[in-house]
Image (cartoon, rainbow, N blue to C red):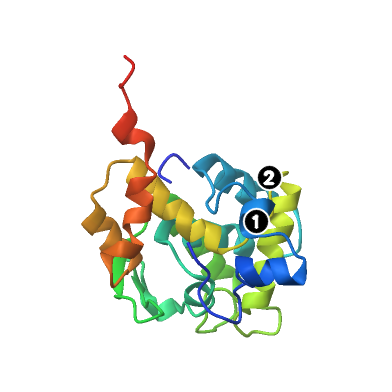
Amino acid sequence: MAKILAFEDNQQSPPDNNLRKVLGRPTNAERRSREHLTPDEVKNLMKAAGDIGRHRLRDRTLILIMFRHGLRVSEAVDLQWDQVNFKAGTIHINRLKKGKPGTHYFQGDEMRALRRLRREQTRNPFIFMTERGGPLTRSTVNKLIERAGRNAEIEFPVHPHMLRHACGYYLANKGVDTRTIQDYLGHISIAHTVRYTELSPNKFKGLWS
């Protein structure tokens, strides 16, 4: 696991902070101190997902792939096996919201998990399936990640888009340049990418040494 903001659409988006206040609901800032997970929290989330439910391999693999490739929920549930090239060790990512598509390399643990998942499935085009053979819904992914967050005892409510942010912050903290992060996450505008590098603590490292 060492290799390890905004919601994707209106159907998944919680009310904005002004509307939350009108409705008497807590704002995002009141519910949680940040909108991303750390790599250790992602690891704990995967472990919790692997300890509950009947689809442990599927759920662990879903969380891992969403984190490593910065996927929105709809991008994850739409993934199909013909996007995976096991021989080359790559996956083609079709981005939503007019984002730029891209081809990413897999790490070894991802490849092993996907191969196992492929062997366990009946012939179906979708990678992440329900028991009935269709793709997971966004609602199901929301619920399983929220449940895993509670079981992992993460101290704030967890939602799936935090995995995309976790990817961006991980890359920024690793020192990856902003343009590369922009391309990796499929951002059309670099303005959506700089949030990760702006909050990276690396630029302050060594100030007091």
Image quarter (top left, top right, bottom left or bottom right) of the C terminus: top left
The residue that label 2 is drawn on is: 154
Residue nearest the viewer, comparing 15 with 124: 15
Name the quadrant containing residue 207: top left
Amino acid, disc 2 = Ile
Residue nearest the viewer, comparing 158 with 4: 158
6 on left or right of 19: left
Relative to 46, residue 142 above or below: below
Name the quadrant containing residue 13: bottom right
Amino acid, disc 1 = Val
Residue 162 image point, x, y percent: 54, 57
Residue 84 image point, x, y percent: 38, 72
Residue 88 showing in the rendered view: no
Relative to 134, residue 138 above or below: above
Write the residue at 46% across / 56% down. Answer: 165
Write the residue at 46% across / 79% down. Answer: 80
Name the quadrant containing residue 21: bottom right
Rounded to the nearest angstrom, the CA distance separating label 2 from label 1 is: 8 Å
Write the residue at 74% across / 58% down. Answer: 147
Q: Secondary structure at mark 2?
A: loop
Residue 158 badge: 1
Q: Residues within 10 Å of mark 2 (few under 14, many from 20)?
A: some
98 on left or right of 123: left
Relative to 42, residue 74 above or below: below
108 on left or right of 6: left
Are the residues tagged 2 and 1 within 8 Å (C-beta)? yes
Residue nearest the viewer, comparing 174 with 87: 174
